[in-house]
Amino acid sequence: MYLSIGSLFIILFLTTYQVQSNTLLNNFNNLFLGTYKKASTYFLTTIDPLIITNADTLTLKHRGQHTSININRQLYHNLKTIAHIPLTIYLSVFNVEANSRNFSSDELIKLKSYLRELRFVRKSLNISDFSSNNEMFQIQFDIIDLSITFLRSLIRSKQLNITALNKFCHKATNLFNINIKHAARAHLDRLHSVIYPIYTKLFNETEQKTVQVLIIGSKPPREGFLIKQYFQKLLGGNNVEGKRLLYAENAADEQGALNILGRWLLDANAAQAFFDDETRLHRDLLMDEASIYIKALFE
């Protein structure tokens, strides 16, 4: 079947017209994107006070002042490092366990290298690195000594005994659970010593009720994330999350996290205006209709 020149011309015209029409609409929507960006940027200028936490750095924006404070969590980091030793060993032998085989020469070399490093760390431990707490200090030796003993048995036998591995893991858990307790308290004590005076003495009553908190993290927070728990309690409960408390994951830097906060607050404001529900634009706008239609598609 052949098309006439006239028919081809009409098809070409309609196709070109459709492309131009789509381009016009896409360009027109750029006006929305531009105004949205400006509005979210404006929202950031209205936030005062604002507390930002990013690893060991706390940033306070208050009454035109921008202050960065180092939250020295070295005790927390020290306890975490020692607690990670048994996990490092477990991960080092994971491939061997999964494949039910003996250690290769390269794997044995790596285990011996880690054993040497572990012995060096043991000799280097200083009680002052653990708040001069004798009980806490002894636990670090117990974790290291347990790990050294297990490593030596692996190197000597050149094979992995699953029963021995499970026994090692359970013993290690009993020990580093004590580290977990100390680490949580050390982290919270340091955070509280910095945040609480700011909240109770620097902020007035209105600021205490309106302060925004932005937590920056490299990955999604685990359930019960310590810093989030702390600020939920400080600000008045779980219902503050998404309103005055926001966790920004995978933000490249502080400005990237602030952009997320600005958009989040703008969406809440617009959702309240259009839907009388400030959370509506924090959910997929198509969610309700999509749920109905997807169900119909599979009936």
Image (spheres, rainbow, N blue to C red):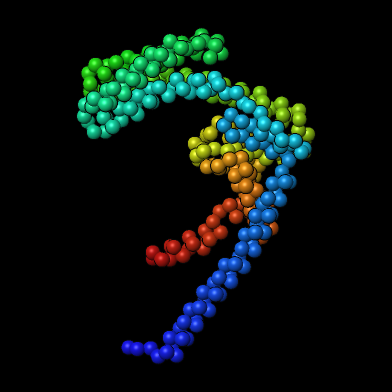
Residue 196's x, y, as percent?
Answer: 69, 27
Residue at point 48%, 60% (across, down): 291
Q: Describe residue 81's horizontal placement relative to residue 110 as left or right.
A: right
Residue that lies at the very extreme toward the top in this rendered image: 134
Q: Describe residue 228's horizontal placement relative to residue 4 as left or right.
A: right
- Quarter where residue 210 is shown: top right
Residue at point 47%, 86% (across, down): 10
Camera-side residue: 166 or 263? 263
In the image, residue 196 sits, relative to residue 12, either above or below, namely above
Camera-side residue: 271 or 155? 155
- Quarter where residue 68 is shown: top right
Residue that lies at the very extreme toward the front in this rendered image: 5
> What is the count of numbered marks?
0
Image quadrant in which the C terminus is located: bottom left
Residue 69's x, y, as percent?
Answer: 66, 28
In the image, residue 2 sits, relative to residue 55, either above or below, namely below
- Quarter where residue 272 is shown: bottom right
Q: Tell me if residue 99 can be seen.
A: yes
In the image, residue 275 sits, relative to residue 147, either above or below, namely below
Image quadrant in which the N terminus is located: bottom left
Q: Describe residue 287's horizontal placement relative to residue 120 as left or right.
A: right
Q: Tell me if residue 209 can be seen.
A: no
Camera-side residue: 263 or 139? 263
Residue at point 26%, 26% (across, down): 106
Residue 18's x, y, as percent?
Answer: 52, 77
Residue 156's x, y, as percent?
Answer: 24, 16
Residue at point 57%, 32% (across, down): 55
Q: Describe residue 144's horizontal placement relative to residue 222 as left or right.
A: left
